[in-house]
Amino acid sequence: MTISIEARGLSKRYRIGGVERYVALRDIITNKLSAPARRLRGEPAPEKKEKETFWALEDISFDIDEGEIVGIIGRNGAGKTTLLKVLTRITRPTKGYANIHGRVGSLLEVGTGFHPELTGRENVYFNGGILGMTKREIDSKFDEIVEFAETGRFIDTVVKRYSSGMQVRLAFAVAAHLDPEILLVDEVLTVGDLKFQRKCIEKMAQVAESGRTILFVSHQMNQIRRLCQRVIWIDQGRMHRDGTTARVVSEYESAANALDAEGAGARQAGGPTQFIGWWLKEGERERSHELESSREPFTVTFLLNVDKPLASAHVGVTLRDSVDTLVWGNGEDGVALPSGVHELSFSLPSMPLKPGHYRWQISIWESSKMLDLWDATTELLVATDPVTHWIDHFAGVMSIPASFATRPADKADA
Amino acid sequence: MSATATDTGSAATSASAPAITRIRPIGGWFDLNLREFWAYRELIYFFVWKDLKVRYKQTFVGAAWAVLQPTATMILFTVFFGGFLGLPTGGLPDPVFYYASLLPWSYFQGAVTTATNTLIDNQGVVTKIYFPRLIMPVSAVIPGLVDLLIASSILIVIMLVYGVTPAITSFLAPLFVLLAACTALGVGLWLSVINAAYRDVRIVIPFIIQAWFFVSPVLYPAESVPKAFRWVYSLNPLTGAIEGFRWSLTGVGNPPGQTVIISSIAVAVLLLTGALYFRRREVMIADVI
């Protein structure tokens, strides 16, 4: 096995606070000018406060072999993106080092460097250039890129008229054709329809099969499971776990769902009244987090641990999409529950949502006092086929098929 | 696959065996890494091309503006400074003198402003993708040359109208434009990183440019400056650029040899220190923007 990425003790320190990062030159000058006077008076220099900085990454070491697809998981702010930024040289580590063997391609954000006033074609060239491709390289891959992005007839339209999905498709297509030895991907596959997401994953798998290395940051365990053999779990800037996908992801999920017995006593059965899990039942499929068809009946079940018996509780549930739009909500009054673990189920005839990722939020109340509010960590994946408008921008929230017909209007109506 | 160890970083265009990219906390003071810059040279083309594409999307407005601005300023100067104040114009008709001075000056002014803001204007890219940052200020001073070229065609017309025949030395004019471009780049290298790190610098920049206008031979010929101060005056690289540009096209006045030499040395120092400072500070750009 040839080594692809070796990281040793990578650490990155940042200053705290977004606004204070912009230092005024005025202050620096005043400070510098008054320094000699201070020294003359024998005053100590103002100390740099350690408190104002924090370690976004601390002592991260790993070796990644050529051809490995490694998932990087962790909560928001755990340091995943910082790690990718260090590895792509966007920012330098404060301590430690890394050696990267081969050309690095990165996809850190959707449509980075896309200029809204330029057409798709022009952006492909500009974006490719920024990513390190030569004009000749882009020329030779242009058709392939456009075909992959499925933006065919819009390629000469200015990008500001593109839907976000189209932009991602084009951006991913450019990056995917960069042919890097190492591809770093950060959460890009969360946008765009599922068909395209699958295509991207296939493409990444294909890239990996040809001996390329992929580092893939995602919150979506479904994607991680599908794509990666190995997972690195970063928590609070530190390496938490590094191992096979099956092991690390299930550990991560159980920690996130607080079903883990060591989970700092947070969400576990036997604790206070709180939600501890959810799953779907759709036809024969049980305990899944994926909705195969959004137009068939299914049941969603939430697991609730009840501490003290509840005489008349209120249960509220909402479902939000990836841009936080509330797409469905329901509630139930007068719920009586003895103490113990209960299954709370909502059965629905259908949930005609377009493909994508959705999040449940469920809460339980007793006489207007909230006992628990839970944002389900595992997302709901609606994996149905898209049946509405083929451009995401016009596809809408609901996925309901329509039949179309024309006929001459009656004279009386005309 | 064999890996050859080099210190050049990953060469963007090489299709050969992968180089090792070494990621380290901080580079040294004298590490310009021009080899990597060279590997990414096509990116300059992409940046300039994008800039021109966006700017000239409405071709007419873009080109008209390039001509309108120096022409209007020239008319004002001719009326007020040439007419009312009667300032000397080194033996050239007022409109020719002012217009010929304004071309390199307007270019410089525009290029410095663009270069100074380039890191902030491109922060979306800077915080997401790595490439040698030096590409940005370099690309920032190039598109203005197109405006300069367009506006130069009007200069020929004005010269002919006022009976000044373009001189045989006209072929030297691009060299003086290059001098102005290097000055703009040198200043841009310094100010762009300072501007990214300290946001209050933005307020100071218009003042610096205004002051620079008065210490450059735009309103008056360099010969108006007392002889004793002439060499200090020539340390301003724009003195050489503007004087040279005017002289090369019109052939009026003495060839500004000494001035150009002093200005060129000054610009070389400015460029080198600017590039070193830029390289030294660029590592923190993505963190502070």
Image (cartoon, coloured by chain):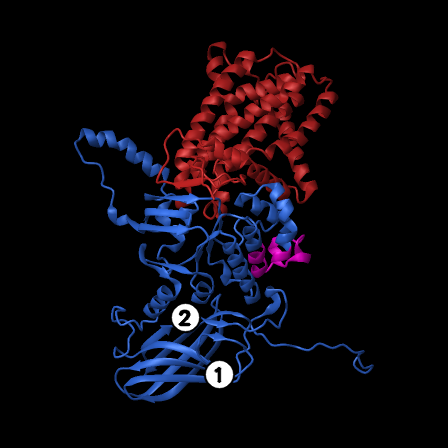
Chain colours: A blue, B red
- Of circles 2 and 1, the one toward us is 1
Establish if B37 lies above or below B222: below
Whole-Å distance between the Cαs marked 2 and 1?
21 Å
Q: Main secondary structure of the magenta part?
A: helix
In the picture, measured across the screen, residue A31 lies left or right of residue A287, that is left
**Could you say where residue A168 lies in the image, as x and y percent from the top left?**
55, 57
Q: Secondary structure at mark 2?
A: loop
In the picture, measured across the screen, residue B158 lies left or right of residue A51, that is right
Label 1 resides on the chain identified as A
Q: Which residue is mark 2?
A: A378
Residue shown at the point (26%, 32%) measured from the top left = A34
> What is the quadrant of the C terminus of chain A in the image?
bottom right
Other residues around mark 1 within 10 Å, as few (<14) / some (14–19) / many (≥20): few
Name which residue type carries label 2: Thr
Frontmost residue, A169 versus A361:
A169
Instruction: Identify residue type, mark 1.
Output: Glu
Is A373 colored magenta in this rendering? Answer: no
Callout 2: chain: A
- Range of the magenta residues? A147-170
* Quadrant of residue A368 within the rendered picture: bottom left
Image position, residue A27 (x, y; %): 32, 38
